[in-house]
Amino acid sequence: DYHYGYDFAGSPRIKALSVADTLVEYNQSVPVFLATGNVSPVAVYTWHDDTGLAETSQVPAFTWIAPEIAGRNVLLLNIESDGKVVSDSIVFNVVANIPRPPIINALSTDSLWYTTGSHLSVTCDATDDASSFAELTYEWSVSGGTIPSVSASGLTWELPDVEGIFEITCKVTDLDGMSASKKKLVLVKSPASGTTSPWAYYPLDGDVKDYSGNHRDASMVGVDATADARGEQGKAYLFNSGNDIIYLDNSSDLNFQDEISLSFWMKLEGLVEESFILSHGSWEERWKVSVTPDSHLRWTVKTNVGVRDLDSSFPLVWNQYYHFAVVYSGYSMELYAGGVLDTFLAHSGALGTTDKPLTFGRKDGTVTRYSLQGTLDEVRIYDVSLRPVEISTLKTTWNSVVTGAEEEEPGVAIYPNPAHGEFYVNGINMERIRRLSIFETTGRAVDFTMQSSGEQLHIAIQDQSAGLLIVEIETASTVYHEKIFVR
């Protein structure tokens, strides 16, 4: 049969001829998708429409411009290949304008969080292809509190008197009846400030003792002393291998389940995969703070409701110190950078429990993968959710106590203990004292007045400090540390 000159080549064919939408408006550019088979490389493509268009080329790519004529319009394609012609067509409906819904670019507020019962202003930034700003209508709704006033594209929202995450919704409608909606979450917190005593506090100033006065000393293996964020040598710890770890043995009171807050300084010096900063049971059992492979800080909390991750809004720069605080409140997860709320989300339930130790720089006591390559400092652990105002002070609150104050010095007595704002110190002559200071367990200095009579000092606290305080008495030969509980 070959010798008789039969042609067994397949006929040209159009496999597909399509567009994104056949409803188009005047002067709209419409890219046409074409798929063919058995078509010669030198085939000729001719396009026609009902307005008299006749365009010919040797390339299959084509963009049709809709005419300014309303109604039905047929776009016809003829392909001539090796003396054969194949055709297909698309039917369009051309209109002067296609109504489109408004676009809400943003619901803008001046903060991520607000105090209970306060007022905030919300503005809706919306645009529309046909209607002007004045022709748009706005509908607002809130999940809590009230709306005392509305003006054009904004409103005043009176927030609830209780803490929580609340939602505001704006619906924008144009003259064509097309609408769009957008929601925004707002974190509402108590305005309470003051100083909260930590469950444990590790300044990491040359040791891993607990400076909260609660006797929860940690242990360390392999870490190296290094400079802190202030440049002071020996005031932070560097983790540079999977064997480096600081850990606190597990205990029942470490597994508190209602709320938690963590505060720390850190510097990232390398990253291959997810790296753990702090962990107690990790995401599988309880909580962790880590750095993701794309360099974002991640706060993970597991409760009896589920597991959720909260990431920082920005990537960490290597070899730069950051102060972070993270909170689980029972209704929210919160992440603070430099003392300012960065991100938050809703979460609830009782924190999970674990029998693993609390670890710094590692996932747990046995897994050496995912270890931190960097520096940790000033780690504070709280069994309550701190408020934003207090969190804003932690980045500038440094340890001022030179020991963990676990053992009281013999010969020095403080009474009464507990005390109501004032107390006496016996057993040391005023002439021997070079300096006397009083600190909260967070390291914040306490204001006081002092009068002496022989070997008795009368001390009166001048501010509102309460709870466990550390009295530091420095002489020429030693430094005494005494604990006093002030009500």
Image: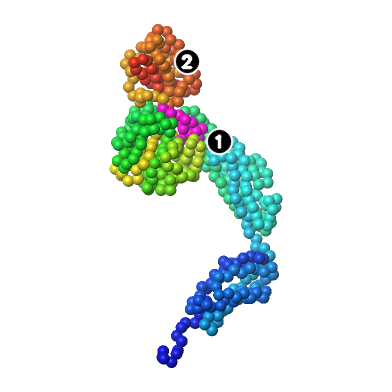
Q: CA distance from mark 1 to mark 2?
A: 35 Å
Q: Picture quarter containing residue 316?
A: top left
As drawn, 298 above or below 430: below
User: Whole-percent x and y of residue 278?
Assistant: 38, 39
Residue behind mark 2: 449
The disc, 1 or 2, on the residue closer to the chain's N-terminal end is 1
Depth check, front residue: 223 or 305: 223
Depth check, front residue: 280 or 163: 280
Q: Quadrant of the N terminus?
A: bottom left
Q: Residue at x 58, y 36 (%)?
A: 117
Q: Picture quarter containing residue 33?
A: bottom right
* Residue 259 can be seen in this image: no
> In the rendered view, does 180 fall on the left or right side of 235?
right
**Mark 1 is on which residue type?**
Thr
SS assignment at label 2 = strand
Q: Which disc, if any, is residue 377?
A: none
Q: In the image, which residues are magenta?
A: 385-399
Residue behind mark 1: 115
Q: Residue at x 29, y 36 (%)?
A: 221
**Residue at the limit of the structure toward the top, as seen here:** 454
Mark 1 or mark 2: which is in front? 2
**Residue at the limit of the structure toward the bottom, as seen here:** 4
Q: Residue at x 36, y 30 (%)?
A: 234
User: Whole-percent x and y of residue 16?
Assistant: 52, 73
Q: Residue at x 32, y 41 (%)?
A: 241
As drawn, 313 above or below 265: below
Badge 1 density bin: few <14, some 14–19, many ≥20, Cα 10 Å = many
